[in-house]
Amino acid sequence: MLTTAQVIAAHTDLDAEESAQLERLVDEWGLLADLSFSDLILWVPDVDDNVFWAAAQLRPNTGPTALEDDVVGDDIFYDPEHLVTEAYLSREISRTSGNKLNAGIPVDVVAIPIVRSGRCIGVVEMHTNRMGVRAPGALEDSYLDAANKIVDMMFRGEYPMAGAPTVPWLSPRVGDGMIYADRRGFVTFASPNALSAFRHLGLSGDLEGESLTAVVRELIPGHNRAPVERPLLQRKLVAHEVDLEGEGEISLRLRILPITDEKGPAGQLVLVRDVSELRERERQLVTKDATIREIHHRVKNNLQTVAALLRLQSRRIQSPPAKEALQDAMKRVQSIALVHEILSQQFDGAVAFDEIADRLMGMVAEAAVVGNSVTVKREGSFGRVPAEVATNLSLVLTELCQNAVEHGFPGRRGQVLVEPVREGSELVVEVSNDGLPLPLGFDLNKTDSLGLSIVVTLVHDMGGSFTLATPPGRWTVATVRIPLAPPEGHRRG
């Protein structure tokens, strides 16, 4: 489906500010859809203002849809009788005179022009399925009364208002609980869900007829009240979201929306959601993340201790081959420790691998037999790499760079180049050097190099492939290909 921005860019001459205003409206119009039990369509005028394009559409969560099909991308073409055209030309709210039939279903239609700086930049069309409208009652009447107030504010350019935008996974919605308070702050309506939420917080009586600010003062401790009281008492047209933290880890989320009429502030619409369970899950996740980071930190410390022991042991050994073997083992342990150090600072299961790669390459260059005569550098980015891949990849990169430095440049100057690139869902890493070519008849499958054997094994465990070759007239290139998502049926060893 096309986005609102795409439709606006393709068909209108609206400027960036006007486009942003409409996108903000679409972000916030779910409140109107749910209060009015209506489908909403945003129509924007073409460069030829006899044509309108459907830029966005939303169905209500509180009632049946009046529109079975998606209309985004459709147009109204030279139809002066259409309600959208009427609202656009008159700059007034237009309504059907009676229930019109849509696919045999009686539907009420309202068109609201969106006028900014004297220019109509769009029309919101509301379609209400009258056949599926819920039986009249206090809840339904209050919803519709609030919807009419929102429509009037939208027409006057006062909705959506400034302030905190809704957060889709956290912000309260109409069905979670709704409270309406008059301009004095006294509750004139509280839905059953809203009342249940406040009872969960500790309310023993009713909300209707009570001052919402006074209720909050009674239910929550003084040091927690201020962030809630301020938006409840303020008279600015600013939307707020606040948390009520009660005893026993009970938490309510409130979205406070000032309501206006032609005379100014007229009350407040407060949406309420009990987020106690959500907050408990967040606390559990924070604890889990902290535990995982602490484990990585301890593993890193233990590995660094192992590396230090290997270094001490290598200094006491006189045999050059044994000393070299211990030093190689120390570097491998250090490369794994580096990954755990980075993971101990992360909040998710992926790491930005560029930092790890740069530190590994610096470690290899500093420890090279030929000193600083060989440079090791990176061109390109690894991006974010899953944690389960990062450890193996760090060892692979260390071995390839170490192998290139030690075997490609016996007493010579030169450079090793590491070039990572993403190709779809695959990470491709080329480690090339301008040193000596591979020996004639080199066969990767028959090599007795421990480092290359480690690379082959680790790359295979990651479900990838590895090649090493010196093309005629070119640098020696080691190529590693690793799928970021393991192929189906493949299990890492």
Image: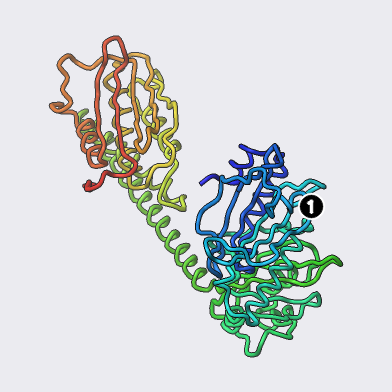
246 sits left or right of 45 in the view: left
Is the image coloured rainbow, by chain, by secondary structure, or in one colour? Answer: rainbow
Instruction: Please state the horizontal and vertical placement of residue 395, each as a whole percent of the image.
Output: 30, 37
Instruction: Please state the horizontal and vertical placement of residue 188, each as a whole percent of the image.
Output: 73, 81
Instruction: Please state the horizontal and vertical placement of residue 163, each as a whole percent of the image.
Output: 71, 58
Q: Which of 353 and 332 is in front in this view?
A: 353
Q: Which of 188 and 315 is in front in this view?
A: 188
Q: In which quarter of the image is residue 182?
A: bottom right
Q: In this view, does 181 lie above or below 15?
A: below
Q: Which residue is drawn at 19% across and 33% down?
A: 453
Q: What element carries label 1?
A: helix
- The answer to whether any part of residue 242 appears in the image is no
Q: Nearer the viewer, residue 13 or 437?
A: 13
Instruction: Please state the horizontal and vertical placement of residue 170, each as a whole percent of the image.
Output: 56, 64
Which residue is the site of mark 1?
Answer: 90
Q: In this view, does 169 lie above or below 42?
A: below
Q: Which residue is drawn at 50% across and 69% down?
A: 278
